Image (cartoon, rainbow, N blue to C red):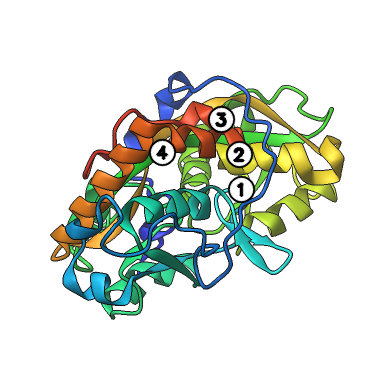
Amino acid sequence: MTASYTRRSAARRSRMAAAGAIAVTGALLLTGCGDQTDQGGSGDTATVGAKAPLFSKLPKEIQDSKVVKVGSDIAYPPVEFKKGGQTVGLDPDLADALGKQLGVRFEFQNGTFDTLLTGMRSGRYQMVMSAMTDTKERQKGIDPETGKKVFEGVDFVDYFSAGVSIYTKKGASESIKTWDDLCGKKIVVQRNTVSHDLAKDQSAKCKKDGGKAIATEAFDTDVEAQTRLRAGGADAGASDYPVAAYAVKTSGGGKDFEIVGDQVEAAPYGIAVAKKDTQLRDALQSAFAAIIKDGEYKKVLDKWQVQDGAVTEAKVNGGS
């Protein structure tokens, strides 16, 4: 597994110079919690089995077990994270809504992000739902840095849109508003994410333009990066907007951080399924269409106050 296959791919690096033009506005003041454990849903599926509206669309294997095994890196609040021993967040709540349409339980299993696709290929999971960005490279199994095929590609059912945000200690944003303002400064990121890649690309651009490079410190998790920034060990951090906004809302009771500037590199999150599992893929797409139509999708996004990331339809392989 290469660095390019972590949480958000940096396939569109050549557009970094114009990244500031890609903005998604609006407030994400994130609150609430979900109700799912590591073993998947709350058990609150409205109809289990054949009486559910879309049960017949599922593969026979899943109809028999009435369980879908989900690979997820459960350390990415507010998308999926632990609270009080439970797995909570946007993804678990959406999975619960899908389960009511499909008549099955979604069983979330924790794993490090860069091993999730490998786990699905080995049969440990039947799908991956973990704030994973849908990209052409992942669809084809290609490493965007080398252009070589490194694993069997996957299909995505897209369900949310998110970009990357810069955040600083509250009241310490100084002149930082865009990625160009980070030249000569220090940034903290989660290792091998698009934020990490964007920092590398911007640093190269800074030097090319005659400025100073960006000092980048990468961590295993966003929480560790936030801890470093909170302690004054960097000038700024960068992460997916829902994650940055959640940190701004919750860390220190809202007193620790602030977001600066606009989102960049907006792209869809997708549920990943194996290319061969077209029946599961299509069932998930139908279930998303159903919850978008009946308003359950909106209720979940409203609960987590991530309405700006809403999509109007669940496309298959809509990433670029």
Mark 4 or 3, nearer chain start: 4
Q: Which residue is mark 4?
A: 160
- The CA distance from mark 3 to mark 1 is 24 Å
Q: Are marks 3 and 1 in contact (CB under 8 Å)?
A: no
State the residue at coordinates (29%, 79%): 123
Rendering coords of residue 27 (x, y %): 63, 24
Q: Which residue is mark 2?
A: 304
Q: Looking at the image, is mark 3 or mark 1 nearer the viewer?
A: 1
Q: Looking at the image, is mark 2 or mark 1 nearer the viewer?
A: 2
Which sits in the foreground, 167 or 278? 278
Mark 3 or 1, nearer chain start: 1
- Against 63, is 95 above or below? above
Q: Are marks 2 and 1 in contact (CB under 8 Å)?
A: yes
**In this rendering, does residue 171 appear at all?**
yes
**In this rendering, does residue 154 appear at all?**
no
Q: Which residue is mark 3?
A: 179
Q: Amino acid at mark 3?
A: Trp
- The CA distance from mark 2 to mark 4 is 13 Å
Q: Looking at the image, is mark 2 or mark 4 nearer the viewer?
A: 2
- On the rendered structure, is 134 left or right of 177? left
Mark 2 or 3, nearer chain start: 3
- On the rendered structure, is 248 left or right of 127? right
Rendering coords of residue 75 (x, y %): 60, 61
Neighbor class of circle 2 (other Cα within 10 Å; few <14, some 14-19, many 20+) is: many
Q: Which mark is residue 78?
A: 1
